[in-house]
Image (cartoon, rainbow, N blue to C red):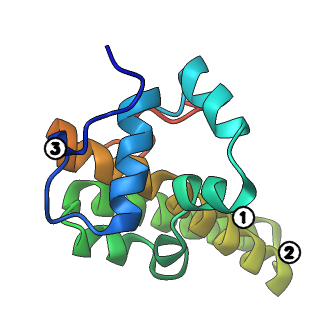
Amino acid sequence: MSDRLTTSALPSNLKPKWRERFEFFEQYGEPSSPEFKAAYKNLPTGKRLLIGINWVGFFFGPLYLLVLGMWRRTLTWFAIISASVIVEGVFAIATGIDIPDAFDVGISCGLAMLVAITTNYSYYLKTMKGDNGWNPFSGMRWF
């Protein structure tokens, strides 16, 4: 097998940034694989940000996943976000503690970053592998 992926295996309508991400995933596998981890570590910072984080996903969250056609993962993210809001609300009511705004912002930013980190590989799975499942963490390093 060759070291570089031939670009003919990728859909021709991909934008250059998606093409680069998909080529990386095709060559080194899923983010949880040792090959991916080693290759990702050796990338320059700009390339690591391109491969590992989707900033549109960070700012627009599950709505961006819906635009990309990943409606199942969108529903999963809405469930996760709703559950975090409910848990926080129940905690505040049960204990009588007023949750600080900084805590709310921290949770929101953390969830937004999780969406941003999982979006690129999720879209790769949908486009290249036909996996349009419910699990937004499929193939990720920590799951």
**Residue at 24%, 45% in the rendered image:** 7
Q: Which residue is mark 2?
A: 97
Q: Is residue 84 visible?
A: yes
Viewer-closest of 11 and 130: 11
- Specify the amino acid type for callout 2: Ile
Q: Quadrant of residue 40?
A: top right
Residue 50 sits in quarter: bottom right
Nearest to the observer: residue 40 or residue 119: 40
Give the residue displayed 74% in from the left and 72% down from the top: 92
Horizontal side of 101 relative to 112 (left or right) equals: right
Q: Nearer the viewer, residue 49 or 70?
A: 49
**Quadrant of the snapshot with the C terminus:** top right
22 left or right, relative to 81: left
Question: Which residue is denoted by mark 1 in the rendering?
Answer: 91
- Which quadrant holds the N terminus? top left
Which badge, 3 or 1, comes first in the chain's sequence?
3
Which sits earlier in the primary sequence, circle 1 or circle 2? Answer: 1
* Three-letter residue code for mark 3: Ser
Residue extending farthest bottom? 101
Question: What label does residue 74 carry, if any?
Answer: none
Placement of 42 over or under 75, stated as above or below: above
Residue 18: percent from the left, percent from the top? 35, 60
Q: Is any part of residue 100 visible from this angle?
A: no
| Residue 6, position as x, y percentages in the image | 25, 37
Residues tagged 1 and 2 counted as in contact (Cβ below 8 A): yes
Give residue 138's quadrant in the image: top left
Give the CA separation, mark 3 to mark 1. Answer: 53 Å
Which residue is identified by label 3?
8
